[in-house]
Image (cartoon, rainbow, N blue to C red):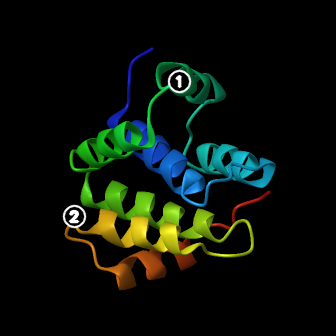
Amino acid sequence: MEQNTYFDALLYLLRVIVYADGVFDEDEVRAIKDICKQEDVSEEYYGDFVSRTKGFSEKKMYQNGIDMIQECTLDEQLRTFAWLYKIAEVDGKVHVKEVRFLLYSLRHTDIEFAQVEKKAGELPAILV
């Protein structure tokens, strides 16, 4: 299956942020699947991604995500960070590691946190 840089960047970083609090629960699984649906990432593509990244450390997932996000357009970067912002709230509480991860990741782009908040408000709600 041909890889898509935006999809992979989004999926790598989503996986890292959901693991930031040490728990990957069913709501977060459903949230990732809903984001995939919103972004037209097929179930086949997501399944292939999970297979390709099985056994990756959090550090490797993060580094791959950051490397790929830098290859994305500004709009794709902004959408990715807006989804990360929204998924951090899915379990009802934003963990400090999730916030640190998001802020640290933004340093690798020219995007301001205020832009992420604004874009997150424009995206549809995540259904869980």
Callout 1: SS? loop
Disc 1 marks a residue whose amino acid type is: Lys
Frontmost residue, 100 versus 6: 100
Residue at the location (53% across, 45% down)?
Answer: 15
Establish if 61 lies above or below 54: below
Frontmost residue, 27 versus 20: 20
Query: Residue 54 shows which numbered tag?
Result: 1
State the image coordinates of residue 23 (x, y, percent, origin top left).
68, 53
Q: Residues within 10 Å of mark 2 (few under 14, many from 20)?
A: some
Residue at the location (35% across, 44% down)?
Answer: 65
Disc 2 marks a residue whose amino acid type is: Thr
State the image coordinates of residue 101 (x, y, percent, origin top left).
41, 64
Query: Residue 38 shows which numbered tag?
Result: none
User: Does 21 sit left or right of 102 as displayed?
Assistant: right
Residue under circle 2? 109
> Whole-Å distance between the Cαs marked 2 and 1?
27 Å
Frontmost residue, 122 versus 100: 100
Quadrant where the C terminus lies?
Answer: bottom right
Q: Are the two marked residues, 2 and 1, in contact with CB atoms closer than 8 angstroms?
A: no
Callout 2: SS? loop
